[in-house]
Amino acid sequence: MNRAHRLLRTAAAALLAAGGLLVPAAPAQAAGTATDLEVVSFSGGRLTVDTYVKTGFARIRNNGPGTPSRLVVTLDRSQVPFQYLMVQPAWPDCTSNQYGTVVTCPVPQDQIPGPGGTLEFPFVVGRMDFDSVTAYAEFTLSVAAPEDTTPGNNSATFGVEVSEESGVDLGVLAPDVTRQLTWPSTPEQDAEAPPLKPGTETLVYADIVNQGNRVAGGLGVAVRLPEGVTFTDNLKECTYTPDRRTAECRSALPQLAPREGVVGVFPVKVSAEVPVPARLTGGQVAVWALDELPADRGGLSRSTLPGYLRALDAEEVRDFDPTDNTDDFAVLLAKPKPATPSPSPKPSDTGAPTPAPTPSHGDGQGGGTGGADGGLPVTGAPAVLIGVVGAGVLLAGGVLLLLARRRRVVLVSPGDEDSTT
């Protein structure tokens, strides 16, 4: 019971800190045209013995030439024993059947991936019986869109496992790059940045979090850029290929304790020769731990190792769940819209800018009492477990990567960079 109380307190704190799961908006595309959505993969489905909740991500890619007018994601968890395991979408406005076995989540239009884009659909994976050691189950994820021309790849089955093992469990999330990002910035500023164009510079982000029960003693990060995109900086911890499209970076500086995260920030430039619109695919970020330390040692450190010490080779440390150690991303360039001439000001116009409207935050009470406010109504036998524990930890796992993005800890200090100019 004490473990359950601690988990619920952690969940409550995470919910207060999160305030919602922010997902970068997709670039504007013409909706309602033929497309091909594919359920590509699911990562983060294994939990160490002392981990009670973690983040998993399903990747839904748009392989077609257009953007659908609607997208619905459906989770069939009828084979998941609710008394042992939880698989829950960390997504607003989901509904379920009366038994809670089938969950349906509509995707807002601005979050539907455009051509070449990927939707990182977040899940919370957790154990419901805190005394159980092992458990395994499978669930099925499906997508549906009226304009999808290839329904054969719209569904896939994945596994979820609670293990009796321990270890480092790194996860990485690399969003598609669609805007001219600069450092430092906030997620809100990133959302307002100009669209990406040929010849412009931007950033590739890699959100990295440790969801295991051991400390990661140092990090290795490998980044591969799509053709037409190159690195612009020389970081002393990184080695680059001659074409400036692949970098491998190792540093003992970040020691990540369980539930700690950092953000890799990699400045890049898009070639001026790239035509628009363009889908530059093939980008990928991979992470691994250089060493593994007990959970009571280490943590996010700012000290470097002396010159006579070396980190262990990556092959000597086994990651508990390697399914979430890599993430693909694309660099998407939209066709620029024709400029619209500004209207001439009226004689009475003072020229002063109009104040932006204050965002509405509701009545300040938060939450809600039913499915209408984005909750997940569940009835039947598992209602107590899902309602009390499941709803409490709905965003506890999903918020880990969100908090990592908000912290924006750079893997390499800007003062350690050598200019390429």
Image (tube, helix red, strand yellow):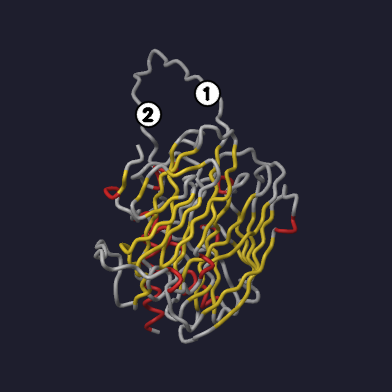
**29 relative to 384, above or below:** above
Q: Label 1 belongs to which residue?
A: 339
The type of residue carrying mark 2 is Thr
Nearer the observer, 315 or 208: 315
Q: How many numbered dots are placed on residues in this image?
A: 2
- Residue 252 found in image quarter: bottom left
Badge 2 crowding class, 10 Å Cα cut-off, few under 14, some 14 to 19, many 20 or more, is few
Residue lying at the far top in this picture: please name it: 347
Left/right of residue 407 with respect to residue 302 in the rendered view: right
Find residue 9 and report its image quarter: bottom left
- Name the residue located 54 percent from the left edge and 74 percent from the top edge: 86
Q: Nearer the viewer, residue 211 or 236?
A: 236
Q: Nearer the viewer, residue 186 or 226?
A: 226
Q: Note whether 270 is above or below 340 in the view shown.
A: below
Quadrant location of the N terminus?
A: bottom left
**Image vertical order of residue 188 relative to residue 352, above or below:** below
Where is residue 416 drawn, in percent x and y?
A: 28, 50
Left or right? Give the position of 310 relative to 317.
left
Does residue 44 sit above or below 107 in this rendering? below
| Gap in angstroms between the C-alphas marked 2 and 1 | 22 Å
Q: Position of residue 78 (x, y in %)?
A: 65, 74
Residue 381 visible in the current orientation: no
- Of callouts 2 and 1, which one flags the residue occurring earlier in the amino acid sequence? 1
Dot 2: what SS? loop
**Residue at left offset 63%, top offset 44%:** 115
The three-letter amino acid code for the residue at tag 1 is Ala
Image quadrant where one finds the C terminus: top left
Q: Which residue is mark 2?
A: 354
**Residue 389: image x %, image y %?**
47, 74
Q: Residues within 10 Å of mark 1 (few under 14, many from 20)?
A: few
Q: Residue at 57% across / 39% down in the picture?
A: 28
Q: Position of residue 230 (x, y in %)?
A: 47, 43
